[in-house]
Image (cartoon, rainbow, N blue to C red):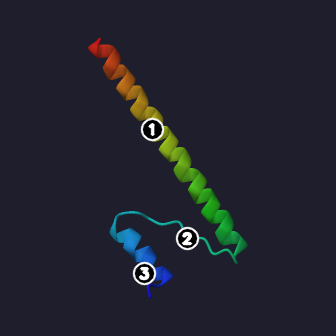
Amino acid sequence: MPTPNDAIEFFRSLGVEPIVIDPNDKGSVEQGLNAITERVLEYKEETAAHDRTATNNQQQGS
């Protein structure tokens, strides 16, 4: 049966750094939630930048 470390290494092999949270460790939970929030905000900014680029390209093509 795969271990948690196997899962971590699997995702790393795909180029994804997993966020690991130990529910029994308050610090781990806090760090994990902060990491998730940070990634969501980064994704939001990337998406907004992509949308701005698409809008600018569309306006230039008009």
Q: Earlier in the sequence, mark 1 or mark 3?
A: 3
Q: Earlier in the sequence, mark 3 or mark 2?
A: 3
Label 3: state its secondary structure: helix
User: Spatial distance from mark 1 to mark 2, Cα to Cα?
Assistant: 25 Å
Label 2: state its secondary structure: loop
**Residue of label 2:** 20
Q: Residue 57 location, x and y as percent?
A: 31, 22
**Residue of label 1:** 47
- Does residue 32 lie above or below 10 as drawn? above
User: Spatial distance from mark 1 to mark 3, Cα to Cα?
Assistant: 31 Å
What residue type is disc 2 on? Val
User: Spatial distance from mark 3 to mark 2, Cα to Cα?
Assistant: 12 Å
Q: Residue 11 location, x and y as percent?
A: 40, 69
Q: Residue at x 70, y 78 (%)?
A: 24
What residue type is disc 3 on? Asp
- Does residue 46 lie above or below 31 as drawn? above
Q: Residues within 10 Å of mark 1 (few under 14, many from 20)?
A: few
* Dots 3, 2 in contact, CB < 8 A: no
Q: Residue at x 29, y 11 (%)?
A: 62
**Residue of label 3:** 6
Q: Residue 10 location, x and y as percent?
A: 38, 74
* Dots 1, 2 in contact, CB < 8 A: no
Label 1: state its secondary structure: helix
What residue type is disc 1 on? Thr
Q: Earlier in the sequence, mark 1 or mark 2?
A: 2
